[in-house]
Image: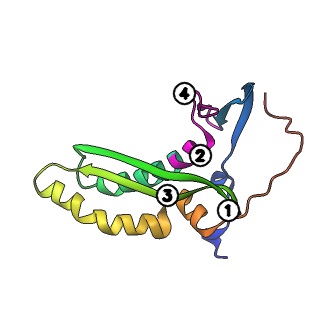
């Protein structure tokens, strides 16, 4: 492990959830941002939808970081889709697909932004997007029951 590979405190991520009602939770990040989580019967995001949102937004942020240096987009929308199944491996999402609809104005700056999209999408897939890379590599998740004293 190189010195740049050693995690620092600023590399740490944390999200806390608290139950607000039966089957309903609120997730809070370290900066105080919140999002509702619940079953598919309400308007809150389901955990699977949050996973898709994390995948598509991670990729979108990376693409925006690169293309915006060249041109401001006229349109930038993206969608993550998947199929939820239950099989011998358990409940899971399959056939995850992220689709971008990104358009730039005509002219030199727009052309420059369009030119970097294929290379950037390859980099997002192969190394940049923390979320999709974590899923594709298959990072183990440890499930622990313990007392968490600092959640209000």
Name the residue carrying label 1.
7
Name the residue carrying label 2.
48
Does residue 143 appear left or right of residue 132 in this picture? right
Query: What stretch of residues is rendered in magenta?
Result: 30-52
Q: CA distance from mark 2 to mark 4?
A: 14 Å
Residue at position x 47%, y 70% in the image: 126
User: In terms of secondary structure, where does tag 4 sit?
Assistant: loop
Tell me, yes or no, whether the highlighted magenta stretch contains residue 40. Answer: yes
Residue at position x 71%, y 38% in the image: 16
Say which of marks 1 and 4 sits in front: 4
User: Residue 33, image x and y in percent?
Assistant: 59, 32
Q: CA distance from mark 3 to mark 4?
A: 22 Å
Name the residue carrying label 4.
43
Name the residue carrying label 3.
96
Q: CA distance from mark 1 to mark 4?
A: 36 Å
- Comes first in the chain, label 1 or label 4: 1
- Comes first in the chain, label 2 or label 4: 4
Q: Seen from this angle, which residue lies furthest left?
A: 107
């Amino acid at each position: 492990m190189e010195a740049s590979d050693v995690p620092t405190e600023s590399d740490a991520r944390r999200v806390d959830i608290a139950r607000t009602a039966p089957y309903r939770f609120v997730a809070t990040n370290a900066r105080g941002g919140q999002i509702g989580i619940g079953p598919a019967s309400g308007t809150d995001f389901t955990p699977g939808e949050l996973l898709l949102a994390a995948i598509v937004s991670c990729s979108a942020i990376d693409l925006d970081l690169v293309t915006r240096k060249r041109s401001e987009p006229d349109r930038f929308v993206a969608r993550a889709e998947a199929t939820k199944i239950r099989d011998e491996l358990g409940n899971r999402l399959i056939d995850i697909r992220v689709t971008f609809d990104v358009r730039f104005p005509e002219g030199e700056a727009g052309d420059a932004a369009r030119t970097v999209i294929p290379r950037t999408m390859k980099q997002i897939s192969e190394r940049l997007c923390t979320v999709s890379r974590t899923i594709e590599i298959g990072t183990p998740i440890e499930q622990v029951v313990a007392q968490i004293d600092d959640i209000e």
